[in-house]
Amino acid sequence: MANRFLGVISALPEEFVHLSDRSGAAHEIGGLRFWRGQIAGREAMFVESGAGKVNAGVAASLLLDRFECRALMLCGVAGGLDPALGVGDVVVGTSHVQHDYGVHKEEGFLTIQPGSRPSLGDDPTPGYPEEAALVARLRDAMKGLALDPLPEAVGVGRRQPTTHFGTILTGDSFVNSDALRARLHLQFSAQAVEMEGGAVAQVARRWGGDIAFVNVRCLSDLAGRRSHLDFRAFLPIAARYASQVAHRLAPAI
């Protein structure tokens, strides 16, 4: 748990503003800058990975190999898939699925587990579920946490953001489609979609079952036809809410 050296990843600079002041000693490897700091009083190594699965996978691998981190936290924004959720709500991942890895068939796209070979008998069921004990610790840590109401200036009304646990999807494309949003939610019963978490989950699993991984995502948009506009408008505020939850959870990882 808290005695494990923690690696913290965000894809974008806006997502890091409230996580670290970047004042610690820095190291540059493979074009990525890693710096040492603290989150919620806990020593950690931070990195801004850039967007996408490959960038996130490289960052996670270096944190585990070069800096000997034994727990990983990914913090940032995401698109909402669940119609019951709204902008500003925060989702903590209990399972991670790479929705764009699979087979294009005549009847549609079949998502399978990355790297699996069903023809050789591998289980193709997609997803990296988190350990029940870790999820239980995170739920306990979240008790009593109340996020600030969304400012009216955001344009979605003065709603009260809430926190949720559920499935987060990952793919190397920004979802800007009502039809795709509906299909992804129906197919996977997922709460959010983003571009890094599934890759970090895959790397963590490859390193071994003792690597804890926590993915904290605040909804900056609803992954529909207006998501490209909502993302730009809500990114700074959503990043702040995500970091607030990340600070709450860091001691429990």
Image: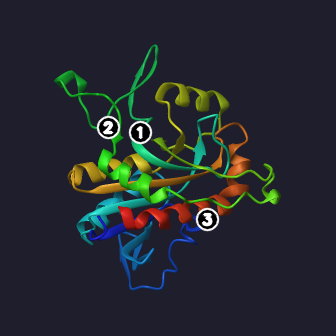
Residue 73, numbered circle: none
Q: Amino acid at mark 2?
A: Pro
Q: Position of residue 164 (x, y in %)?
A: 53, 46
Per the image, label 2 sits on a secondary structure element best described as loop
Q: How many marks?
A: 3
Which picture quadrant has residue 181?
Answer: top right
In the displayed structure, 30 sits above or below 186; it is: below
Q: Which residue is mark 1?
A: 98
- The picture places residue 28, in percent across and down from the top left corner, at 37, 77
Q: Is residue 147 above or below residue 110?
A: below
Q: The N terminus appears in which quarter of the rendering?
A: bottom left
* Neighbour tally class for label 1: few under 14, some 14-19, many 20 plus, Cα within 10 Å: many
Check disc 1 and give the amino acid type.
Gln
Q: Earlier in the sequence, mark 2 or mark 3?
A: 2
Q: Is residue 116 left or right of residue 24?
A: left
Disc 1 on helix, strand or loop?
A: strand
Q: Is residue 170 visible?
A: no
Q: Nearer the viewer, mark 2 or mark 3?
A: 3
Q: Earlier in the sequence, mark 2 or mark 1?
A: 1
Instruction: Single out the mark in the foreground, 1 or 3.
Output: 3
**C-alpha distance separating marks 2 and 3:** 32 Å
Q: Secondary structure at mark 3?
A: helix
Does 11 sit left or right of 180 as displayed? left
Residue carrying label 2: 114
First in sequence: mark 1 or mark 3? 1
Label annotation for residue 240: 3
In terms of depth relative to the viewer, which is nearer, 174 or 154? Answer: 154
Q: Amino acid at mark 3?
A: Arg
Query: Do the numbered discs 2 and 1 sit on residues whose CB atoms are within 8 Å?
Result: yes
